Amino acid sequence: MKPSPVQLMQLMFKHVKVELDPAHLPAEVPNPLTSVFTFDGVSLQSEVGIGEADPDHERGTVFFVELRVVVDNEPNPGNKDQKYAPYKVDVAVEGVVLIPKGAEQLADAEDLAAVNGASMLWSAVREQVLTITSRMRAGPVVLPSVHFHDLKKRNEAPEVAAPPAIAVKRVRRSAKN
């Protein structure tokens, strides 16, 4: 095992909101030992913000990375096969990511921070949602595993292409945000 060239130095939740959606509750509570809701076909939105916090840090470059994940269960007329989650979810988290000196040989430092930082934050959101819903009436839910490779600057656009169920938006932030 070796340490990753990208280090999450700090993680802070800005808000965590998970609530039952009465309009989309299952008819019967699923058995958590045999089934867990997995968000297949459910519309997930995420927004990632990144900004350079300290370009002259003694160990490398430090970035702020923000992630917001939303499941609002709003109908999408463009998706005839849309499914709905038993919960509405709105979670925002921010992290401080260090790209050590020399890591720019692997890729652009900001790309490394955006792609890997967002992945690390997603894992924390995924775990938080599972933990909270494991004690809720509709049973535990697990956000899907995802990747954020489409956040690289060369792919940057107002709306970045992603699997149909997951909309990802990248927002550039300044260190003052």
Image: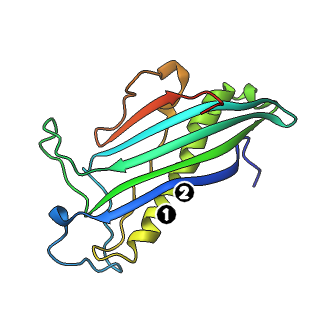
Residue contact between numbered discs 1 and 2, judged by CB atoms under 8 Å: yes
| Total numbered circles | 2
Query: Residue under circle 2?
Result: 124
Q: Is residue 33 above or below residue 43?
A: below
Q: Is residue 142 above or below residue 120?
A: below
Q: Looking at this view, is 160 or 176 the one in front?
A: 176
Mark 2 element type? helix
Query: Residue under circle 1?
Result: 128
The quarter of the image holding the C terminus is top right
Residue sitting at x 33%, y 60%: 38
Q: Looking at this view, is 56 or 151 the one in front?
A: 56
Mark 1 element type? helix
Q: Amino acid at mark 2?
A: Ala
The quarter of the image holding the N terminus is bottom right
In the rendered image, residue 61, in percent from the top left (x then y), is placed at: 76, 32
Residue sitting at x 36%, y 71%: 140
User: Mark 2: few, some, or many residues within 10 Å (few <14, many ≥20)?
Assistant: some
Q: Is residue 52 above or below residue 69?
A: above
Q: Is residue 134 above or below residue 58?
A: below
**Residue 166: quarter of image:** top left
Residue sitting at x 61%, y 27%: 174
